[in-house]
Amino acid sequence: MKLLHLLPGFDPAMGGTLAFVKAWVKASEEEGIISHILALQPEQEESLSEGYELIRIPSQSGVYRYSSKLVPWLKEHLNEYDRVIIHGVWQYHTLGAWRVLRNHSIPYYLFPHGMLDDWFRRTYPLKHLKKCLYWWLFESKVLKGARAVIYTSEEEQRSSSKVFYPYEAKDKIVPLGIHDPRKEKSSDQELFFKIYPSCIGKKIVLFLGRLHPKKGCDLLIRAFATALHHDRDWVLVIAGPEGEQGYEEKLSALAKEQIEDESNRVIWTGGVEGEMKWSLIRSAHCFCLPSHQENFGIAVVESLACGTPVLISDQINIWKTIERGKGGMVSSDTVEGMEGLLKKWSQISEQELNGYRLNARKIFEENFRIEETVSKLNQLIAYS
C-alpha cells in the first residue's frame, strides 16, 4: 500500500500534527507501507526533509497557503497512490485535494486534528462567522466525501460534530501515539544541562509546545509567579516556537512583570528537537500544559513516555487517562487551577514523585505506543 499524506506545511511550528505524521510514516515502513508527504510551502520558507519522502508544492505565504500548482500536481500523480490522508482543515490543501478526489476512485481520509473544536468559536466569534460561510461552501463537502473522518478521542469527536451545520461524516476514533524514546540509539541525557548549566540542581517546571494563546502559557507564568515565588530551587523552562506573531514578546513581558529575578528563573529555549528535546523532558521535574483546548497533546504523551509526570488542564482530551492512571495532576484551565497544582506538586515527597514517574511511563506503554496506533490506522485505511 502506498499512502500520500497532505499537509499545509512542514514546519516544526505545526507542533503535534507534524510530529504524529512523521511517526506514522516511520512506523508504517516496518509494515511495508510506502508513504510520501506533500506539503504546501512558500518559496522563501525552508525545511529539512530529514529522510522523509517530502514533496514541496510552492504556495502563497500566510495562513491559507493557496497554491495554483496543487491541483495540477494531484491530477498528474494521484494514480501513483492507493490512499490519501488529509491532515487539518480550513487551509487550501484540503479544498485543493477535494477538488481532485471527489471525482476519483482513490479514497481519502481526513484528520481534523482539533481544528473543529468549539473553543475556536467561543474565542474568535468573528472568525467563526467566516468559517461558517466557508463550511457551507466547501469544508462540509470535504468531510462528507471522506471515507472516514478520524478523531483522536471521543471528546474531540463529540465537540467537533456540534459546531458547524450541516455535519455529515463517517466518524472514526483512533488515539494517536509516538515512538518510544527509550528505543533511540543515542541520547545524551545531559545535553540540556550542558547548554543551560544554570539549571543544574534545579527543579524544572517545563512548558513544551507552540507559543500560542490557546496553550495557556500566560496562565502558567502567573501561576508559577504565585505558587513558587519564594522557592529558588524551581525554575520555569519555556520551550517551543512562536505560534502566533508577537505572542512570545507578550509572554516575555509578562514574565518580567510577574516573576522576580526573571532572567535567572525563566529559561526561553525556542524550538527544540531531537536529542535536545528528549534531554529536556527527562530533566524536568514536571511537564505543564494548562491548555484551553487540545484534541490530544503530543507533548503530553512524549513526557509520559520519558516518565515525566504531567500537570495539565481538563481541556486536554486525554486528561481522564492521565488522572485515572495517576501519571500527574489535573485542574481547570485557570490561573487558580494551575497555581493549586504547582503548590501541591511542590510539596510531594521523593517517594511520591517516583510513583508518579512510574505511573506516567505505564500510561504511555498501555495507551500511546505508535506501533499499536499505526496498526489500527493502517487496517482502517486498508479495509474501510
Image (cartoon, grey):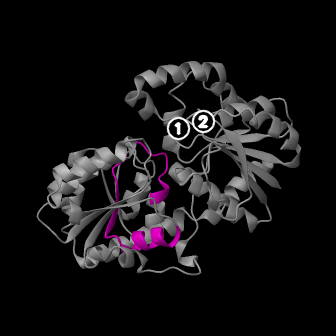
* Residue 9 screen position, x and y as percent: 62, 46
Q: Is residue 290 magenta?
A: yes
Q: Label 1, on which residue?
A: 115
**Secondary structure category for the residue under label 2:** loop
Would you say residue 122 is visible in this rendering?
yes
Instruction: Give the camera-side residue of 288 and 375.
Output: 288
* Residue 339 screen position, x and y as percent: 21, 53
Instruction: Tell me: 229 left or right of 377.
Output: left
Instruction: Tell me: 376 left or right of 15.
Output: right
- Residue 157 occupies which quadrant of the picture? top right
Residue farthest along the left direction in this orientation: 230
Instruction: Give the camera-side residue of 103 and 171.
Output: 103
Residue at the spot x=47%, y=53% of the render? Answer: 297
Residue 89: assigned label: 2
Would you say residue 166 is visible in this rendering?
no
Three-letter residue code for mark 1: Met
Instruction: Tell me: 122 left or right of 263.
Output: right
> What is the C-alpha distance between the residues marked 1 and 2?
7 Å
**Secondary structure category for the residue under label 1:** loop
Quadrant where the image shows the N terminus: bottom right
Q: Residues within 10 Å of mark 2 (few under 14, many from 20)?
A: many
Total count of labels: 2
Residue at the spot x=70%, y=41% of the render? Answer: 58
Please report whichever mark, 1 or 2, sits nearer to the chain's N-terminal start.
2
Three-letter residue code for mark 2: Val
Q: Are marks 1 and 2 in contact (CB under 8 Å)?
A: yes
Quadrant where the image shows the C terminus: top right
Q: Is residue 234 magenta?
A: no
Q: Which residues are magenta?
A: 274-299
* Residue 337 screen position, x and y as percent: 24, 49
* Residue 379 screen position, x and y as percent: 74, 54
